[in-house]
Image (tube, coloured by chain):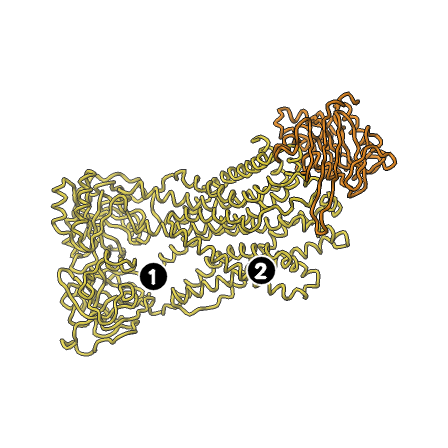
Chain colours: A orange, B yellow
Amino acid sequence: MNENKTNPLLVVNHLNKTVTSPDGDLILLNEINVRIYSAQSVAIAGASGAGKSTLLAILAGLDVPSSGQVLLDGANLFSLDEDGRAQLRGRLIGFVFQSFQLLPSLTALENVMLPLELLAINDAQDKARQVLNRVGLEKRVSHYPRQLSGGEQQRVAIARAFAVQPKILLADEPTGNLDMGTGEKIIDLLFSLNSEQGTTLILVTHDEKLASRCERKLYMENGKLDEVRRDHV
Amino acid sequence: MFKLAFKQLKREWRAGELYVLFFSLVIAVAAVSSVNFFADRIHRALQTQANELLGADLVLSGDRQFAQKYIDKAEQLDLTALRQLTFPSMVLSENGNQLSLLKVVDSGYPLRGELGISQTLFAPPHTAADIVLPGKVWLEPRLMTALSLVVGDSIDIGEKQFIVDAILKSEPGRGGDLLNIAPRVLMNYADIAATGLVQPGSRVRYSLLIAGAVSPIKEYRQYVTEVNEPGIRMQGIADARPEIRVALSRAEQFLGLAALASVILAGVAIALAARRFASTHLDHCAVMRCVGATQNMIFMIYFLQILFIGILASVVGVISGFLFHQILIEILGSLMGVELPLPSLMPAFFGAVTGIVTLLGFALPPILALKTVPALRVLKRDLGKISLPGAASYLLGIAALAFIMVWQSRDFKMGLYMVGGALLTVIVLAIVALVLLLVLRFFRHLYKTPILFGLRNLIRRPAATVVQMVAFGLGIMALLVLTLIRGDLLDQWQASIPDDAPNRFLINIHPDQVSSVKTFFQTRSAAVPDIYPMIRGRLVELNGVAINEKTVSDSAAKQMLSRELNLSWAENLAEGGKIINGEWWQSGERTERVPPQFSIEKSVAKNLGVVLGDVLKFKVADQYVEANVTSVREVDWGSFKANFYVIASPGLLDEMPSTYMSPFYLAPEKYELLNELVAEFGNVTVIDVAAVMTHVRKIISRVSLAVEYVFVFTLLSGFMVLLAGIQSTHDERLLENAIARTVGGSKKQIYRTLATEFVSLGMLSGFVAALLASVIAAVLAYYVLKMPVQVNEMLWITGLVGGGIGVGIVGLFGSRGAVTQPPMTVLKKLSA
């Protein structure tokens, strides 16, 4: 699994994020250094407000750090502008969110097609159908999100994330809005796609069971990131 | 990119999010293009038929016979010149008499175009080889019908008898005569003397028709300009029928303004809908940013979508406008009497530009804001919520509308006035609406029963409520003014005319006939009418300084100086006149002791800037008369009594060439007398005042019907504003209703609350509209028609009830989706 250890996919160096609040400066991320290799699965755990989502947002280039560096597939994320980061995201990163983030006016198929169309991929519809088949929604392609259950909506979101065959999949509490049974099925799906496509999986969770299925576990507390603190997970 | 934008648009359309945006635009484009298609066809008719309308390349016209030098000059330049006379006269037959317009022409007429004649009423016309022969006349079909004539019958005109030789179906110079109610008679020039109709002082229009090659025509034009004889008007192909052009361009500007009212309202609906479109796409954009879309991509996707909506709506709007303009043609076309050619593509182009400019003006700012939505919004929803631009962003839309207005009016100054007028109306409406809303708010503690909850909804969304009230207020006001007030004022005006007001005018009585006309009535035991002298003279000097249409700037003064005025002389001040300044001369025995002086009518004095003591010099025929102004009169023109702009003291005009006229009331049972009268005095012309009034009324009602139709678009746009308003608060209402139903409210209760809200919104708008319409009615009555102001309660009833029902129905229809969805579905959807 760690055959690419010499050549990390994601490198985080001295990452800091501070925001100004009425009560003075608030440190959200404090000197974060981490390397994540291709095809690894990594859980980022921690209590609410520890800074997990902030870190995830910065890793994806959705938010900018106060200082520090993130190298994604060799590219320095913050030497690019907003649009440059968006394009990089489109090519390399897939997202799965707690609240699914499907577009209500689009059908399941159209939601999955969206990133493919943005990348101007020709057979977007066929590809989207294949991925929806893979997540078991072949009979739901023309349904709108409101006509789907929570589990089904998350499967559409996963299909959308994997449709562009990203190098990294970022998942923010992917089972947070689902019941336990459904959540487990979703996680199974996530891991099997991860191994099929050799995608690097980074997921933020406070679900212990979920975290323990990952190869690496990182723990966040007061803006600091520590490797493998099993007693906390 | 294009494919992606188009695909997404298809999805949006299916979801029903774009209907309001689309249809608002369709209505605006349809309104503007229908008016422009109509105007375009009329213009083209005038353009293509210009020289046919003129019957020549150049026409000189005036109140006097043209001097020989004009004909000599034409001959010298190798141009053809023909004389022509037109004047009203009675046509007598065994079956009655009819006021007609005589056109007396020389052989060779027309120089351009042709005469179409036939032998029976319904036979297709053929081109006449020459003009009518002496002793014969050609009559227009309606004259044939009116006098039950057939070809071959004989008629009397003046002192001569004529044989009806053919029916005149078409002739140059006829089309487009809006107010020409008298049917045409074509007569040979050789016959004019024998009729005895043309006497010094007769109301005859003399024309000189000129035709030939382009450069001599140009030279001839130059010559006439240099001679610069007062009272001679020159019309070329380019300036054919200026009076029609002016009337039409007024009508167009008015219809155009009416159409623009719907564009303004559509702009409001588009602004609301575009804002809603942007706000519902914030998540969409964040997700797209997340999966790799650049800012430009996002902008282009939405820009292309908006552009596509604009193009599609413009196409649909232009087609609807084209279909709709047929109704306008139906209503107004017959008044024009012109064969209309197919329209050009210009109105379609203008309609499409209006649509796209309005859309981009109002939709671009929110769309531009979309590209700045941060991708982080996918994780933190509260981000990007307030990034939509505020009120300042509407400046672009307002600028777009101002641009369209100025363009539509084809006159920068006029366009700016329109923009100003529109803004002022909207501001006044908005202030009244705001005041009403504040009053409503003041009593808010009273709205405790569920049925009044609807009123609280109005107070809670003050901006939306005011915008909607302005929109409906505008639409309802326009319709009230055009329907109720118009009819009302016309009725009131007609009612204000006394029963014994003159209903017939006799004109063209020769001086030697005055006593016999009086005897005519006396011997038939009818009231003997007053008969007044009428002298035609042109004002040439004011206080020793030459004055003509070129030396004044006031348009009314220009008009007065460009023609001869009707002057009169009298010993006593006539009924219906009142001295407001100075003194009337001593009445009594006609005597040389009364020094020469003039009495002048108030509006003439004002337009020409004449005050007491000024010296006026008139040219009557070839003589000059000069005197001081010693009094200013106010005249009640509505009384139909004889009145003149300028009246001279006895002795000043007595010897000038004159004809006599008499306005008088003739009881309907004595109408038969008129046949005898014209039989006895062939040259005397009888004008039926009632017929003129009916014709004027018909024109007013046709024109206002056309404007009403255009205002239907305004009302439709008003409804689109309402739907856009409902749509923009849709999620809020959905949540409110879902929660209300969760805690036990029934659908019926919710519908009742909504009904209260919309019905009261409609009634408030109706109130605002009725209020402003009343003000407009009062101003029109008092200042224009000079009648006492009357309250029309129907105005208020129609405004309130119509507004309440109309807005109530559309409002409930528009918000039904917010009630029928099961509460759980709503709560799940909105919390997702």
From mark 1 to mark 2, how far is it between C-alphas? 40 Å
The x, y position of residue B384, in whole percent, is 64, 44
Give the camera-side residue of B373 and B430.
B373
Q: Chain of mark 2?
A: B
Give the camera-side residue of B628 and A211.
A211
Q: Chain of mark 1?
A: B
Residue B400 appears anywhere in the view: yes
- Left or right: residue B191 versus residue B825 is left
- What count of labels does the image hold? 2
Label ID, residue B763: 2
Quarter assignment of residue B121: top left
Which residue is at 67% across, 50% downward?
B732
Label ID, residue B411: none
In the picture of the structure, the residue carrying the numbered disc 1 is B690
- Left or right: residue B475 versus residue B748 is left
Lower sequence index among marks 1 and 2: 1
